[in-house]
Amino acid sequence: MNTKYVFVTGGVASSLGKGILAASLAKLLQARGLRVTIQKFDPYINIDPGTLNPYEHGECYVTDDGAETDLDLGHYERFLGVHMSKANNVTTGKIYYTVINKEREGAYLGKTVQIVPHITDEIKRRMLLLGKTGKYDVVVTEIGGTVGDMESQPFLEAIRQLQWEMPEDDLASIHLTLVPYLSAAKELKTKPTQHSVQMLQQAGVFPDVIVCRTEKELTPEIRRKVALFCNVKPGHVIQSIDAPSIYQVPLNMENEGLDKMILDHFGIKDLPDPDFSRLKAFLSKLYHPKYQVDIALVGKYVELQDAYKSILESFIHSGAANECKVNVHTVQSEYIDQSNIEDKISGMDGILVAPGFGERGLEGKVLAIRYAREHDIPFFGICLGMQMCVVEFARDVLGFAEAASTEVNPATPYPVIDLMEDQKSTTIKGGTMRLGAYDCVLDQDSMAYRIYGKDKISERHRHRYEFNSDYLGKMEAAGLKATGRNPETGLVEIVEIPSHPFFIGVQFHPELKSTPEHPQPIFVAFVKAAMQYREENRSN
């Protein structure tokens, strides 16, 4: 069987959930026994989102092989339970970078380099690259942006050319669009969808299935109307109605028959029905929790939910594992000070201090960590959160009042967090941090070992600064223990306070490996500690 390709485009508005739709279709096909992967093509000219402010693009997701990618790759991994790679995220920047380098090398033999055919040829090459490895039966490709965007036009032209070049039953196109409900008129409106599909067809791409995002059920009449005016087969207009959880969407798409439509289009038959017993068990726990906890997420990008997307998803996974609803209260660290720390933090059952870069909001993070340490509230610090718990301990326990990270104070007399040695000669910012999965060896007499149940783990990183081991002796003598280290470099990966009920900081990003069926162990343990803290506080 030839590798099959599915392209998912979007129209009318952004944030309709193309990534969730693509991941849901891939999960349906995977559950039927097919080998499936997903890739994201982003229209922005940055090489990757690694240098983008989280307010611009949400979180930067990091893969095992060190790729800084779009956050949708996190959805792909969480839905499919497989690892993505550098090949799964392509940007306009990467496309142009490749073409310009080829031109400089003389690869085009003096020809005038143009969007068509040179840029579109490179796009097509990348679109087919994963399929040519022989590892996959189906490659699902999400096209970022919306139809009508200037930046998306080369990608649509590439799809048009592929539709012309490839056998009809090797390529399918799905268009996600919006059918808004006008409360004043008390009706759903299909005109935005019609216009969106017309723009897509003007670009030469003719969708095989139209998926309508809606908050109200689509009537059979509306479905027939959209099919008629958008020139798709009757029955190939389906709804993606608002769901209580994104993990419900694959089941909704199965009910709509999306996977059967695509399989019929490809001529693939006699596959087993999907088995979603584990997903349904997860959703049952998610929808019917027995307990609840309140967790403070202390960070500097809290105004945009997508900035901490993987952390929020990890709380959903670990909450379900504990049959507990995790109420996440975002706290802007920039606005925490001594006068309001009690009001912002005191009612919480756990405190997570989030990752980030730069000086803004750091002192608020330090105050939140001190409050958690002194009041025995379960604490979990990730990356910068771990570094700030080291700074707080140095200041408030060791008495090094001017202790700091050299990221924000290069002249500090106590550089307890310092630039990694291999970063000191680096001047290029993009893609040069410590990125990807690295091993970590755990002390057997530690909370980290009890959480993971093994002495060696692998977690993903994204940082330039590290624990300065010159201060390790003093830290450990005062009660902050280094319980996880990289076996090759000696880099301190995990710190704990054994005398505290639950106080752990990790240099890596555990949230990047959490899935509904395999929740991240530290998050599970953190939620369990918050549940215990809540029970004890209520009983007292």
Image (spheres, helix red, strand yellow):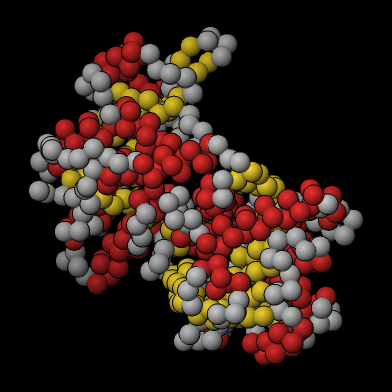
Q: In this view, does 454 lie above or below 246?
A: below
In this rendering, position of residue 243 left or right of residue 263: right
Asked whether the viewer can see residue 284, the reply is: yes
Q: Is residue 398 left or right of residue 279?
A: right
Q: On the rendered structure, is 396 left or right of 130?
A: right
Q: Position of residue 207 (x, y in %)?
A: 25, 31
Query: Residue at the spot x=43%, y=18% of the render?
Result: 217
Residue 119 placed where, x, y %?
27, 53
- The residue at 42%/51% (across/down) is 517
- Which quadrant of the figure has residue 228? top left
Is residue 92 visible in the rendered image? The answer is no
The residue depicted at 23 percent of the width and 52 percent of the height is: 35
Q: Residue furthest right?
A: 339
Front residue (pair 308, 503): 503
Q: Position of residue 526 (x, y in %)?
A: 62, 59
- In this rendering, is residue 260 above or below 328? above
User: Residue at point 70% right, 75% down?
Assistant: 498
Task: Find residue 353 and report its horizontal and vertical position in percent.
Answer: 67, 61
Figure label count: 0
Q: Nearer the viewer, residue 3 or 501?
A: 501
Extreme-front residue of the structure: 539
